Image (cartoon, helix red, strand yellow):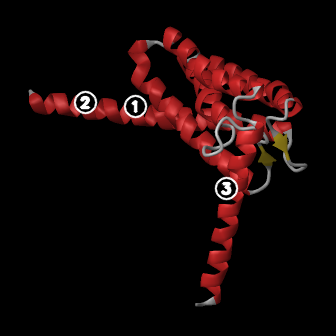
Amino acid sequence: MSTLGNDYEQISDLQNQLIDLKINFWIQNDLFKLHWWTLLVVTLLPWLIWWKYVDRSKLNVLITYGLLWMIISLLLDDIGIALGLWQYPLELFSFVPPLFPADITILPITYMFIFQYFPKKSSFLIATLGSASLFSYIIEPVFISFNLYRPSNYWKHYYTLIVIFFLSYIIKWITIKLQNQVDHNQIDHLKREQ
């Protein structure tokens, strides 16, 4: 077998050992502990609140916006972990991305509400800047104090602010482009039916 094959087998064996260690650590230190229940509630409760207050006439565009937030958040979180920029010592589930509650609940719901309630450019700018500041300078330090989040020495709070702020605009732009395309296709379809 080639050196490349041996190297891959060694990496695969180490990954399997790491997976076993993570699952055992999660079962012994996270599962059903107070912080685990807190993460579970933080993952589920905001969706119930969102469902109560969402503008159902804009459901398609809001879900598109929220799903884009989820995908990008999960992707960036995985990249940050892989690069050693941050860690999440406590987890809801050991087999999903570590800060699952923030990636699939907190960020998407926050920004779906901002998208819904602040449609004008100026109000969207202020709401986005305010929420990005809240996440960066209040929520991140709280997560650090509860050992839910551990940034490396290289990651600064203002990086989070910049990333979240620009992501909200990029995701809004993509969502509007997609919605315009859907609207355009529906109009074309209606014209063909006539």
Q: Secondary structure at mark 3?
A: helix
Residue pointed to by mark 3: 19
153, above or below 100, in the image: below
Residue drawn at the location 65% of the way across and 19% of the way down: 122
Place residue 128 in its image quadrant.
top right
Q: Quadrant of the N terminus?
A: bottom right
- In this view of the protein, which residue sits in the foreground, 182 or 10? 10
Q: Is residue 67 left or right of residue 13?
A: left
Around disc 3, counting alpha carbons within 10 Å, would you say few (fewer than 14), some (14 to 19), or many (20 or more)? some
Q: Earlier in the sequence, mark 2 or mark 3?
A: 3
Image coordinates of residue 136 in percent, x first then y, are 80, 31
Residue pointed to by mark 2: 186
Q: What amino acid is labelled 1 in the image?
A: Gln
125, above or below 103, in the image: above
Image coordinates of residue 182 in percent, x first then y, are 33, 33
Q: Is residue 22 left or right of residue 48?
A: right
Q: Are marks 2 and 1 in contact (CB under 8 Å)?
A: no
Mark 2 vs mark 3, CA separation in Å: 47 Å
Image coordinates of residue 141 in percent, x first then y, are 86, 30
Residue pointed to by mark 1: 179
Q: Earlier in the sequence, mark 3 or mark 1?
A: 3
Q: Are marks 3 and 1 in contact (CB under 8 Å)?
A: no
11, above or below 74, in the image: below
Image coordinates of residue 70 in percent, x first then y, are 56, 36
Outermost residue toward the bottom in this view: 1
Mark 3 vs mark 1, CA separation in Å: 40 Å
Mark 3 vs mark 1: in front: 3
Outermost residue toward the top in this view: 52
Q: Quadrant of the C terminus?
A: top left
Q: What amino acid is labelled 3 in the image?
A: Ile
Q: Is residue 149 left or right of residue 124?
A: right
Residue drawn at the location 42% of the way across and 18% of the way down: 58
